[in-house]
Amino acid sequence: MKLFLKYIKPYVYYYILGPIFMLVEVAGEIILPWLLSKIINVGAANHDVGYITRIGLVMVLVAVCMAVGGVLGAWFAANAAMNFGADLRMDLFEKIQKFSFNNIDKFSTGSLITRLTNDITQIQNMIMQTLRACLRSPGILIGAITMAFVISPSLAIVFIIVVPVLVISIIIIMKKAFPRFKALQNSIDCLNSCVQEGLVNIRLIKSFVRKDYEEKRFDEHNKDLFDKNIHAMNIMIKYQPVMTLALNATTVAVVWFGGNMIIGGKMQVGDLTAFINYIVQIMGSLTMLSIVFLNWARAVASFRRVREVLEEEIDLTDDNALYKERKVEDGNISFKNVSFRYYKNSEENVLSNISFDVKAGQTLAIIGPTGSGKTTLVSLISRLYDVDAGEVCVDGVNVKEYSLDNLRNGIGMVLQKNTLFSGDIYENLRWGNENADEKTIAQAAADAQADKFIRGFREGYNTQLGQGGSNVSGGQKQRLCIARALLKHPKILILDDSTSAVDTATEKYIRDVLYGKYSDMTKIIIAQRITSVMEADEILVMDNGCVKGFGTHEELLKTCPLYKEIFDIQISKEVG
Amino acid sequence: MPPMGGVTGAMKGTGGSMGKKKERPKNTKNTIIRLFSYMKETKLQLAGALCCVLASTVSTLAASYMLRPVINNYIIGFNENGGIKSLAMALVVMASVYLLGVLATYFQAKLMLKVSQRAMFSLRRDLFVHMQKLPVSFFDMNSKGDLMSRYTNDVDVVGEMLNSTAVQLFSGIMTLVGTFAMMIYTNIWLSLITFVMAPVIIYSGRFLVSRSRKYYAAQQKSLGALNGCIEETISGQRVVKVFCHEKQAVEDFKKYNYDLKDKQIKAQFFGGIMGPVVGNLGQVNYSLTAMIGGILCVLKGFDIGGLTIFVTYARQFSRPINEITMQMNTIFSALAGAERVFDICDMEVEDVTGDIPDNVKGEIVMDDVTFGYRKDTPVLKHISLVAKKGQKIAFVGSTGAGKTTITNLLTRFYEIWDGGITLDGRDIRTLNMEELRKNIALVLQDTHLFTGTVMENIRYGRLDASDEEVIAAAKTANADYFIRHLSEGYDTVLEGDGSNLSQGQRQLLNIARAALSKAPVLIMDEATSSVDTITERQIQDGMDRLMSDRTTFVIAHRLSTIRNADAIMVLENGEIIEWGTHEQLLAMKGRYYELYTGKAELD
């Protein structure tokens, strides 16, 4: 809970004023019946019209005050809750921005999104409701009981009996309901995933003609949901009758005992009227309280999920970096006995004992089967993950000693699964360099062989890209991503299978530009096609996280059987 | 066949109706009638529930009224009216009426629960069953999230309305009318205050609702923008990090976040003051009633018991108004939700009827086929080919050349515009659609698995296959080895779309599934794209066995996998520009030769 106090602090007066104004309402609720009893006991009994009018006007005034109090209370509650939510969301988002790749992998993208949206909304609603109810319900409860005792202590004993009985039965109902609601939620999830599978697999279902089978599956889940719903709600529908029953029983008891007291001259009629009013209020506040409790149960789950993210330890920081001011100057890379695994408890390394050097301006190509660790290897250079053993150095300095910004700004990386963002092409390319002018951008795009097709769009560089770049083809997207990376003018450029959808001729142009114009840039190219790697200064062949070969194309053909095999499958057969 | 088939027509309709998403229902009357039809099954329960509502409302009003004689006759006028015994009697009657009311409330809830849950059950079922019958084009055109939300949000809000809103509305109106009646009966002059106050309360309630609706819409819009920003940034988080774009991302987010906050405060405030304003206007009414009532007691001899119950009525009066106003919102969104569900249920289904082919050999002929997804933009133009039983036909060509479209046409996921496709010499449009599909096994690039064991997932290919047959199929696809290394072997439960398997492994399971099927026609659409070159070679034997006695259509990115095809079709811009065997095509020195020798690459 401590974690969340900081979101209350700046707005603490909202948290104080909100409930205080709510108290105005509470006070009114308590005073009104009492004033009413005055009208009956004093005014009507003494036939004093002036008195009745005076008290009546006071009552109207109280009611108006209550309205004002309620409105102001709502205002402060809304402010408190929404500020809390907005600030919390801000922090959550900033925290996620600090996440390492490892942290992101741990929470799925979907779950992070839900936490930022649904969970926070849930919390906001909860706070608002709590602020409006937290003093109100107990206040009315206490006030009404107190007044009841003031009017007639002996009659108020009825409450002493009824309220605990009621509270206990509410608790019993809630306790019983809770596991049933959990089972219900589970059942809802099952049905949803069944429907979801039905939607994504529609081609399969149709081609195998499994309509009936799917319907049977759905029916089972649907029936289960129906049963669980009935099961859970059967408990909840007892709630209202129990409350009403208690209310009614109390009323009858009060009328009976109160009636006897009036008959015996120990009480006045107006007091009885007030008493009955207080009963209604007590029951109302108890209902309100139990609703708040029920919602809290849900909000607590949201709090927990948000806290998980906020408390997640960021396992990769530059706090202890030695040379925070240092920038990547040349682009030499060296791996020294590097081993790495994604899950610290897994036995097998994803990369084991990797060593090699790349000099500034050279081109290194990496090739190997899927899952051999190529992408992992290049991720270590930008320190997207930390090595488990050995060290990765850039310009002779361990990557851990750079500040993350300086390191990553020195490295241009085009990821395998790349993303463009909604906005126009200019905006997207400016990710590489915020201050780039239109000419520079066009130049970088031309180098990535993207300028031509961009100009082919009706709105050229101002063309809006859909979310994730959905309105450009795969090959166009890859070229835009390369242009974006080139705009950074990095010392090291990493292309992770980023020309797979570009045709060979265009790819060749891109490579020519990289070798020519960007000759002082160190280039690392991961590729599937052997033709894309053949010309590199050095080729690294990987399999199962190990280096299987390192050298030029000619050398590897002689020394590395795996390289030769890949070459054979892809090329030599064509010739033969 | 006219250029615009029935399916295409239905598709257009889909797109149109789904484009506008309004919270206001469009055809309220029909929707309501249709919703009622979902309660037909439980109409007795529904009638019972309504009777219960009536009983509980009447008894609540009656019990409140009974206080009047109790106070007047037995407490104030104690001595004239039979003493303590009659007071006790009166209270017993009152308690019984109360009890009746409570029982009625309980049974009403119980009955309505059955009614609403039953209706939701049927609604969900109808939706699912109907969706299964819709053409593939429907699923291609609508986002999964949108369709999912019909099962969840829309059905839920309908259920909520059926469960509580309808009853509350009914009881609210009953209470309102009943309270009015009782007030007039008790004291007509005192009722005038409430008559004056009621429009004020109702009007201010309505004013606040419309106000809050306006701000609420602004809040939703802002929330949508924020969610879009969140989704995009978090999904692209890796790129954000690689470009050190975190600060910028936070700045962007801040803008959306605080904009939302401002809108939210307004929306929640106006939503939140509804209760206090309407409720406390009720208190004003209560106070005025108490004052005037007190004066009437003095001047006109109005009885104290009457005053007591009258102020109780005046107090209760605002509650049903409050409730009804609040429920109106739920009702509107529930009707809109129901309409969205019915929209789908009304969509035109695939016409599956037709002749049932028997002893299918698997000979497929495409004759001058032209097709496109959108009117006026054909994707395939004048495609003709013959695939004899057991032959392997391969398609190569760049993305967008129309390779996958051919599979969509063979399975009749989409209907062709022009030309004809025959299976064993019979036009596939004359065949029963389901029977046609039973004769085609499909292996797709997007590999999705079902929640269930590995065994169940493979058995999807043929439901009556024995365990041995499943394992044999897995061996054919070279999947047996990795399956045995899973924690529970074939009984390993795959969850969340088989996320614990690699893409390549999932493709192998898909191939196993097709291997199990006995369909004489096999379509492999990039079926091994995520399997690496070496593994692909290992499964080659199995694949050859799989294809040996079936007519096979292969779409592949990697040319090495299709060398031994009986015919290779090179597609470009929807047309077959070259065709022949591997050797013939190489000899032609055309596009295929360029592709194969690496002079050109596929996009």
Image (cartoon, grey):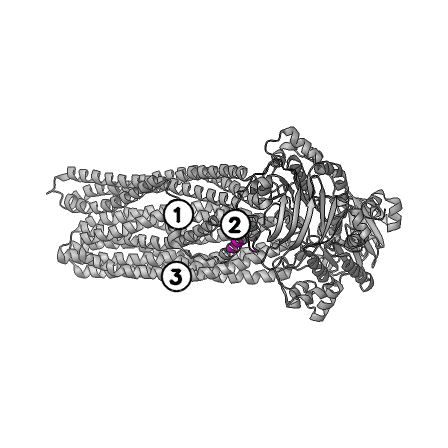
The disc labelled 3 sits on which kind of residue?
Answer: Ser
Residue B242 in picture, x, y percent from top left = 69, 56
Q: Is residue A143 left or right of residue B63?
A: right
- The residue carrying pointer 1 sits among few (fewer than 14), some (14 to 19) or many (20 or more) residues within 10 Å by Cα, namely some
Which is more toward the observer, A576 or B488?
Answer: A576
Which is more toward the observer, A496 or A396?
Answer: A496
Chain bearing tag 3 is B
Q: CA distance from mark 2 to mark 3?
A: 30 Å
Residue A381 in picture, x, y percent from top left = 75, 53
Q: Which residue is mark 2?
A: B147
Q: Is residue A264 visible?
A: no
Q: Quadrant of residue B437?
A: top right
Front label number (2 vs 3):
2
Same chain letter for marks 1 and 3: yes
Q: Is residue B130 above or below residue A362?
A: above
- The residue carrying pointer 3 sits among few (fewer than 14), some (14 to 19) or many (20 or more) residues within 10 Å by Cα, namely some
Residue B179 within the magenta-colored segment of the rendering: no
State the residue at coordinates (56%, 57%): B228
**Looking at the image, do the residues carrying marks 1 and 2 touch, with CB atoms under 8 Å apart?**
no
State the residue at coordinates (79%, 55%): B590
Magenta range: B3-14
Q: Quadrant of residue B459?
A: top right
**Looking at the image, do the residues carrying marks 2 and 3 touch, with CB atoms under 8 Å apart?**
no
Residue B316 in picture, x, y percent from top left = 28, 52
Which is more toward the observer, B144 or A391?
Answer: B144
The disc labelled 2 sits on which kind of residue?
Answer: Leu
Q: Secondary structure at mark 2?
A: helix
Q: CA distance from mark 1 to mark 2?
A: 20 Å
Q: Is residue A504 left or right of residue B18?
A: right
State the residue at coordinates (49%, 56%): B17
Q: CA distance from mark 1 to mark 3?
A: 26 Å
Q: Secondary structure at mark 1?
A: helix
